[in-house]
Image (tube, rainbow, N blue to C red):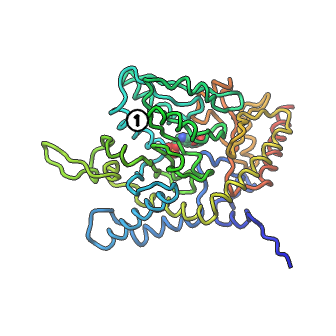
């Protein structure tokens, strides 16, 4: 007897996410805004409740039992993150508010200490504003310059141009791993290799990639990697900055306050060791614990299973949307994650989003915090359907029917 095994039981997976049962305007929710934030499985919600019901206390401060429990839960979450991205040491994992804070931390500490007048920082044409503005602030303060790797029409980086941008003045490279607006997965290994050949450190903005691509920071060889918990099925308000220990050790602190010090007198303060040096004040302890639970959950589904199901969804969605004459996909890189960004002839993205919402379909419309990228394509905004592993082909069919409805409304 042969048994057929369903390799990916999406109906089963959906049971883990209570919000997916919600009705919007009387219709089943079709949640296609996963690049903005992902929904949370019951396991993460339970972990937050359990933390507050049974363990809540402050960490690293008390000898009392609850404080020990909270500390163990918090440090346990750090170890889960370490394993998840395969960092060498726990101390290389810094809990921050999210990707945005992680990048600002590096710009304001490593950047301020190492970048001076006339120096250059390289980013790409497809960055989220949070990997543009922190560097602009630094450049303005220091008299440094921002250089931008251009892209082709498919949304792929021009690596030859990157090589020619690398100069004796280049001090830092900061690149998005997977674009939120196009879906492009960048050739980050090559980008790192070329920078490291010139002793230039590299930060990867992993806000999107972390939920879709297995991450191994040692294999990638990146110096910094930033991501947000809420895009990885975890809570909002918590994220991670990975940094190589030798770099973090040498960097000045970011914020001053409790926890980040070894000793304080009015004359002089000695700073704590990493990671505490970068974790001033009471952290989002419950959020970190929730992020740990999200990582457990994602591991139980399996990053490889997630990646292969999302690949199938992306191929199906690309095929279906390409069949619609009035739809133009923006972002057609050969190597891309499960993001379908598009514009429609005659219909503004905002109107498309409003009509889709009436059908229960949640997509993001706008510039996706990537205004320079929109300028590159000559559009003010796009409609973006971003898929997660709990999405289905039937939901893509619903999206296509919604787009048909848009066409109907605008042809009147
Ligand atoms: N970098 C990338 C590539 C992102 O996609 C985002 C958020 C950020 C940085 C910032 O992350 P945060 O958690 O610190 O805000 N991207 C989006 C988006 O595409 N729609 O809403 C937020």
Q: Residue at x 61, y 39 (%)?
A: 187
Rendered view: 139 above or below 408: above
Residue occupying the point 83% across, 46% down? 401
Quarter of the picture containing the N terminus is bottom right
Q: Residue shown at 78%/47% (left/top)?
A: 315
Question: Residue 197 location in percent, x, y?
Answer: 48, 34
Q: Quadrant of ligand 1?
A: top right
Relative placement, left or right, of 244 versus 409 is left
Q: Nearer the viewer, residue 204 or 183?
A: 204
Q: Is residue 29 visible?
A: no
Label 1 CA crowd tier, 10 Å (few <14, some 14–19, many 20+): many
> Percent from the top left, x then y, of residue 171?
42, 29
Q: Nearer the viewer, residue 290 or 346?
A: 290
Mark 1, residue position: 107
Q: Position of residue 12 (x, y in %)?
A: 71, 67
| Residue sitting farthest toward the bottom | 1
């Amino acid at each position: 007897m042969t048994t057929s095994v369903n390799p990916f039981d999406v109906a089963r997976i959906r049971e883990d996410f209570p919000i997916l049962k919600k009705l919007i305007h009387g219709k089943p929710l079709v949640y296609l805004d996963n690049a903005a934030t992902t929904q949370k499985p019951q396991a993460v919600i339970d972990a937050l409740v359990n933390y507050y019901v049974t363990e809540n206390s402050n960490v690293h401060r008390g000898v009392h039992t609850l404080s020990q429990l909270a500390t163990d839960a918090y440090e346990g979450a750090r170890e889960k993150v370490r394993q998840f991205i395969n960092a060498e040491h726990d101390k290389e994992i810094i809990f921050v508010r999210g990707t945005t804070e992680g990048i600002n931390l590096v710009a304001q500490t490593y950047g301020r200490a190492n970048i001076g007048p006339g120096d250059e920082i390289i980013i790409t044409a497809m960055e989220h504003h949070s990997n543009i503005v922190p560097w602009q602030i630094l450049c303005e303060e220091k008299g440094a310059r921002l250089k931008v790797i251009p892209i082709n029409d498919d949304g792929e980086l021009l690596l030859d141009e990157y090589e020619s941008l690398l100069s004796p003045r280049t001090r830092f490279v900061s690149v998005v791993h997977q674009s939120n607006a196009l879906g492009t997965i960048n050739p980050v290994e090559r980008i790192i290799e070329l920078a490291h050949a010139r002793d230039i450190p590299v930060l990867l903005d992993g806000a999107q990639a972390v939920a879709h691509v297995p991450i191994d920071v040692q294999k990638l060889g990146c110096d910094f990697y930033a991501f947000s918990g809420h895009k990885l099925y975890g809570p909002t308000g918590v994220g991670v900055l990975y940094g190589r220990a030798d770099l973090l050790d040498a960097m000045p602190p970011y914020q001053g306050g409790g926890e980040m010090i070894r000793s304080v007198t009015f004359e002089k303060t000695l700073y704590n060791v990493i990671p505490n040096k970068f974790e001033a004040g009471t952290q989002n302890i419950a959020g970190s614990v929730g992020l740990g639970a999200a990582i457990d959950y994602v591991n139980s589904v399996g990053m490889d299973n997630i990646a292969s199901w999302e690949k199938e969804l992306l191929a199906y969605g690309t095929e279906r949307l390409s069949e619609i004459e009035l739809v133009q996909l923006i972002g057609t890189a050969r190597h891309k994650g499960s993001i379908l960004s598009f514009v429609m002839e005659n219909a503004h993205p905002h109107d498309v989003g409003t009509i889709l919402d009436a059908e229960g379909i949640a997509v993001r419309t706008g510039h996706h915090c990537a205004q320079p990228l929109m300028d590159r394509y000559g559009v003010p905004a796009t409609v973006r359907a971003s898929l997660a592993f709990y999405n289905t082909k039937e939901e893509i069919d619903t999206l296509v029917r919604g787009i048909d409805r848009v066409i109907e409304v605008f042809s009147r």
